[in-house]
Image: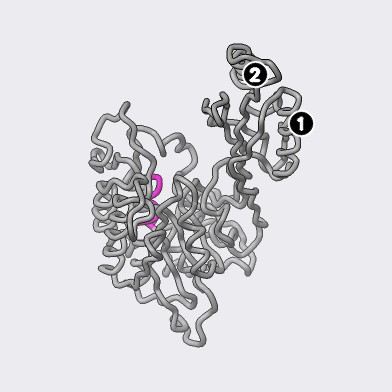
Amino acid sequence: MGSTRNFDERAVSVDPSLEGRIFAEVDAVSDEMIEAIRRIVRQKSVRGEPEEGAPFGADVRAALDQTLEVCRGLGFETTNVDGYMGYASWSSEGGNGGGLPLPGYVCAIGHLDVVPEGSAGWKVEPYSAHLENGRITGRGVLDNKGPIYACLYGLWALKRLGLAPNRDVRIIFGCNEESGFNDLRHYLEHEDAPVMGFTPDCKYPVVYAERGRMGVRLAAVPGEGEGREALLARFFSFVNEYVLSAKPNGERFGIDCNDEEFGVTEVRNYKLAFDEGAPAVEFAISYPAGITADELRGRLEALAAALGLRLTVTGNLNPVRFEKDCRLVRTLEYAYEHTTGNDGSPVTTTGGTYAKLMPNIVPFGPSFPGQRDIGHQPNEWMDVKDLIVNAKVYALSLYLLSR
């Protein structure tokens, strides 16, 4: 614990004795936190058919209701935003130093919805929250129920210590992160955006920049007099050359780009489909800030025209970038280093989180360096000790951001 890195005045610092009190209080609530995490993992929350008050299905709504009940039990005010999202809040009254509260709010925002568990590869029941040798296994424990509960219990530790915030704090629970971000769009139509915040849905150290992400569909368009068999042969030839035999950097599509900060373009998540009866291939482009969405579209349109294909852009989220020395990034860097003792130098990511849409937030945790390919997989797991460390990182972060 404790880093020798010098932080400028824009990153609030904490007296070591107070850090120790915060970390000790997280330890004190950790058993209760782990049991709460196991209970919410047992609640399946895959998107289902919409119902009244449950836009993403009854299971997701049940997870939200359960979570808000936990929040109220910890003494927080709760708000249900029409079943799309919910949040726990701790209102400022000027904090411990008195004076007027600071405007707006800071937040941690995660999600309760999960991807389907699938039918193969599991060694335990996917929703059993199986605990063995200090490791919890279950769908959603990492992505993202465990981490957002770590934020909640980190904030509760601050509340138990009487460390009232100078600015309102919210822990926000999303319900549609895995399949569209429609929860967050609804939230932003009815609630203000935070002043600062983070989403515990990526990796450590703090991520100061996310790549853009574009969804694309290319469908074979029948040429004049072209029969079905000839159309399929042309489409298969295209897939063989541009997908199966291609590097993942998009060079066959003419969209490869190398950026000093973000690295190279990545093309992935290929899927064969039909588009108005025509054979098609869908894929996602993870692109650096060195190329724009309009440039990508223009290059793909030219390729599609040359090959007799129809281009559809199914969605796009632009890259997000913060300055490394801004208050938000420096503060989270400080919190990570002072909790773990590890290097907290900011990094970029190829992933996509709520930071794409929610203003003024960055991805921050929960996976530590070397922990990869866990979420969305069979036997998704998170270690109890890592959940506790996360709660300490997030407690210190929320304390700092709320001042």
Callout 2: few (<14), some (14-19), or many (20+) C-alpha neighbours within 10 Å? some
Mark 2 vs mark 1, CA separation in Å = 15 Å
Number of numbered discs: 2
Q: In the image, what residue type sits under mark 1? A: Ala
**Residue at (28% x, 37% y) in the render:** 126
Is residue 331 on the magenta stretch?
Answer: no
Residue 161 image point, x, y percent: 34, 73
Q: What residue occupies the far front of the structure in this picture?
A: 225
Return the disc, 2 or 1, that comes first in the chain's sequence. 2
Query: Is residue 290 at least partly visible in the picture?
Result: no
Query: Is residue 365 at least partly visible in the picture?
Result: yes
Residue 181 image point, x, y percent: 49, 52
Chief secondary structure of the magenta portion:
helix
Q: Which one is nearer the viewer's eye here, 140 or 387?
A: 140
Indicate whether 231 appears above or below 2.
above
Q: What stretch is highlighted in magenta?
A: 141-150
Q: Which residue is denoted by mark 1 in the rendering?
A: 302
Callout 1: few (<14), some (14-19), or many (20+) C-alpha neighbours within 10 Å? some
**Residue at (30% x, 40% y) in the render:** 138
Q: Quadrant of residue 169?
A: bottom left
Residue 211 image point, x, y percent: 62, 44
Q: Which one is nearer the viewer's eye here, 30 or 2?
A: 30
Q: Which residue is denoted by mark 2 in the rendering?
A: 238
Q: Quadrant of residue 175?
A: bottom left
